Image: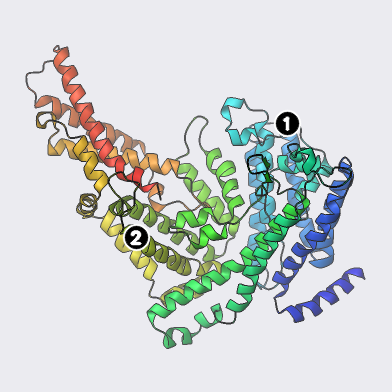
């Protein structure tokens, strides 16, 4: 009866606001988190049971009373209880992977069910969004439990700070799972943060004179930073409502869009449309973060130098960084930041063998996990694959073109650098306008039609770039870029050795091939795939045959180098030593020349 009354009021408000049902209900629950957070802050600091029951009760109101998703609650309970018993009672090294497989399989079931067995309607809310947040939290939970039994030297500083030394009882665990301020949209965070939050140890560094109220409440005042997040979200919401009047997908997918406007207009239209897609995420993430700040879990320490509190513990979006980004990697680092943390710390680094750096296998598995986590609809994969290519192009341009606009020190920008920045900004943002449309359209044919209205200009530009820098003429193209790179020319001049000690052209080419391969692998291992999107060149498998070929090339270069000095015999150790020193100096010189442009490029 009560639920029916609530739903009746919700229907009336829907007509007034003009939002679809899914967007309105999620926004309404997120806004409700603010008064609920005010109440939570005033609960007794040491009554942990009451706090957990309150958290679970509020989330139940959201799911049952507002969203009317009784079956959705069952879905969340299946994932959470299954993970609880796996992590508590499975005492093997395979536990975190069993937990991961269970959660991802259950999520996949939900994705497939909504795609193939239910009539899809994006305006009707389903539980998969909340389940995606839950998968992040509970896969991390499994690793945090596992890490508590591992030697400290095998853990990173981050994972050491996340360990769960004692498996929690069911009530605080469910409180973590159903934390009301983030249960529907995130942000996701680790159990250790929730535990410190409930027990108020998260606020141990708050000075006594900064504690509010006569009873010196543990949670400091957070109304102002929370309000700032809400106003920030409201700002993007106001633009979203206005943008929807001028740009929409329905018009793009109609024949009128293509027939009525020229190519330049269409690519800029897709840019603005892509921005309008992002605005609803900006709005809900910022308001949700504000709710987390108000209740206290967004607290991230006290800064004595500035005499201020930091409230960025659960930050999920940096709108300024994204909207001003000059390359895809930078933009993606500012987007869905907690998902990036999850993929980095609980997928990417976990695939690598203990003591080894993550490589191709980690990259590929992270890519697959991120893609499958988002869903099974074709549009997601079109966006992901194209995004991976876009990151590759960004690396190519930063490595080969950007140094041309810097002085010989590799840091100081030339006056022409402003032109480079201007062009890269527009190229990046226009590329996002193209790449992200299938992520919203989802349908394969409609996505391809949308891309065809702008003549597939991003895939064509990608093909041309890869042909120039990876194709048969790549050496000439790269050499031309290096001839206009002051840092490269300076390094070449400084490392020039006497002619008699130089490798021949054939020897140099062989060593260069090996060194370039090593440099590229080293660079790819250090660059963690953002949101699981790897640059395509990272997906080149390093096989045993390739490693054997590298050693063969170096061996042939050494044999040739030594052979051209016929006076050196096997027992002439002094001569062999001098020849070997000259040879290694040559390799170091080639390595320096190869590495210099890459070091410069990472300043971007």
In the image, taking residue 156 as reference, residue 571 lies left or right, namely left
Label 2: which residue?
A: 420
Picture quadrant where residue 425 is located: bottom left
Q: Around disc 2, counting alpha carbons within 10 Å, would you say few (fewer than 14), some (14 to 19), or many (20 or more)?
A: some
The residue under the point 46% across, 54% down is 329
How is the rendered protein coloured? rainbow
Where in the figure is residue 272, as x and y percent of width and height? 51, 73
The residue under the point 36% across, 60% down is 418
The residue under the point 39% across, 83% down is 262
Where in the figure is residue 410, as x and y percent of width and height? 32, 45
Q: Are marks 1 and 2 in contact (CB under 8 Å)?
A: no
Q: Against 18, is 208 above or below?
A: above
In the image, taking residue 369 as reference, residue 537 lies left or right, namely left
The residue under the point 22% across, 28% down is 585
> What residue occupies the far left of the structure in this picture?
567
Sequence-first disc among 1 and 2: 1
Picture quadrant where residue 71 is located: bottom right
In the image, taking residue 161 as reference, residue 407 lies left or right, namely left
Where in the figure is residue 286, as x and y percent of width and height? 66, 60
> What residue occupies the far right of the structure in this picture?
1
Would you say residue 442 is visible in this rendering?
Answer: no
Q: Against 254, is 23 above or below?
A: above
**Which mark, residue 165?**
1
Q: Around disc 1, counting alpha carbons within 10 Å, would you say few (fewer than 14), some (14 to 19), or many (20 or more)?
A: few
Find numbered disc 2 in the image and state the secondary structure of the residue it sits on.
helix
């Amino acid at each position: 009866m009560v639920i029916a009354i609530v739903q009746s009021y919700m229907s009336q408000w829907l007509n007034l606001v003009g939002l679809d049902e899914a967007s309105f209900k999620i926004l309404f629950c997120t806004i409700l988190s603010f008064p609920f957070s005010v109440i939570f802050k005033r609960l007794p600091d040491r009554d942990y049971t009451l706090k957990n029951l309150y958290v679970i009760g509020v989330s139940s109101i959201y799911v049952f009373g507002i969203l009317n998703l009784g079956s959705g609650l069952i879905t969340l309970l299946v994932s959470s209880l299954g993970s609880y018993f796996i992590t508590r009672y499975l005492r093997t090294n395979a536990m975190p992977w069993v937990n991961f497989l269970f959660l991802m399989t259950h999520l996949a079931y939900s994705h497939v069910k909504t795609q193939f067995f239910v009539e899809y309607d994006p305006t009707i809310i389903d539980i998969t969004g909340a389940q995606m947040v839950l998968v992040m939290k509970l896969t991390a939970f499994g690793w945090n439990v596992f890490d508590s039994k591992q030697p400290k030297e095998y853990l990173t500083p981050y994972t050491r700070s996340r360990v769960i030394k004692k498996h929690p009882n069911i009530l605080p665990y469910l409180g973590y799972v159903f934390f009301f301020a983030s249960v529907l949209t995130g942000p996701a965070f680790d159990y250790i943060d929730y535990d410190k939050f409930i027990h108020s140890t998260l606020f141990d560094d708050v000075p006594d004179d900064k504690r509010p109220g006569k009873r010196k409440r543990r949670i400091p005042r957070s109304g102002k930073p929370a309000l700032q997040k809400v106003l920030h979200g409201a700002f993007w919401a106001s633009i979203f409502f206005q943008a929807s009047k001028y740009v929409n997908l329905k018009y793009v997918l109609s024949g009128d869009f293509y027939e009525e406007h020229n190519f330049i207009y269409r690519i800029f239209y897709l840019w603005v449309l892509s921005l309008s897609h992002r605005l609803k995420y900006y709005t809900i993430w910022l308001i949700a973060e504000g709710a987390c700040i108000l209740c206290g879990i967004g607290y991230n320490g006290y800064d004595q130098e500035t005499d201020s509190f930091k409230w960025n513990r659960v930050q999920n979006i940096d709108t300024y960084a994204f909207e001003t980004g000059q390359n895809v990697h930078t933009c993606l680092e500012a987007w869905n930041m907690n998902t990036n943390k999850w993929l980095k710390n609980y997928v990417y680094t976990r695939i690598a063998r203990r003591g080894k750096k993550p490589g191709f296998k980690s990259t590929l598995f992270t890519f697959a996990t991120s893609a499958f986590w988002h869903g099974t609809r074709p549009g997601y994969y079109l966006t992901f694959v194209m995004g991976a290519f876009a990151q590759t192009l960004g690396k190519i341009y930063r490595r080969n073109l950007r140094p041309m606009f810097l002085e010989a020190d590799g840091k100081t920008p030339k006056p022409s650098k402003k032109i480079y920045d201007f062009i890269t900004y527009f190229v990046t943002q226009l590329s996002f306008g193209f790449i992200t449309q299938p992520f919203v359209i989802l349908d394969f044919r409609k996505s391809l039609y949308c891309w065809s209205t702008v003549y597939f200009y991003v895939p064509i530009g990608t093909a041309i770039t890869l042909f120039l820098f990876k194709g048969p003429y790549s050496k000439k193209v790269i050499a031309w870029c290096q001839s206009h790179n002051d840092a490269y020319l300076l390094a070449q001049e400084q490392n020039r050795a006497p002619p008699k000690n130089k490798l021949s052209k054939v020897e140099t080419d062989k060593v260069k091939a090996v060194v370039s391969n090593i440099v590229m692998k080293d660079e790819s291992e250090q660059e963690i795939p953002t949101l699981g999107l790897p640059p395509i060149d990272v997906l080149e498998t390093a096989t045993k045959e390739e490693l054997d070929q590298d050693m063969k090339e170096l061996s042939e270069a050494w044999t040739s180098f030594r052979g051209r000095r016929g006076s050196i015999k096997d027992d002439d150790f002094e001569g062999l030593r001098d020849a070997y020193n000259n040879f290694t100096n040559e390799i170091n010189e080639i390595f320096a020349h190869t590495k210099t442009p890459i070091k410069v490029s990472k300043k971007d």
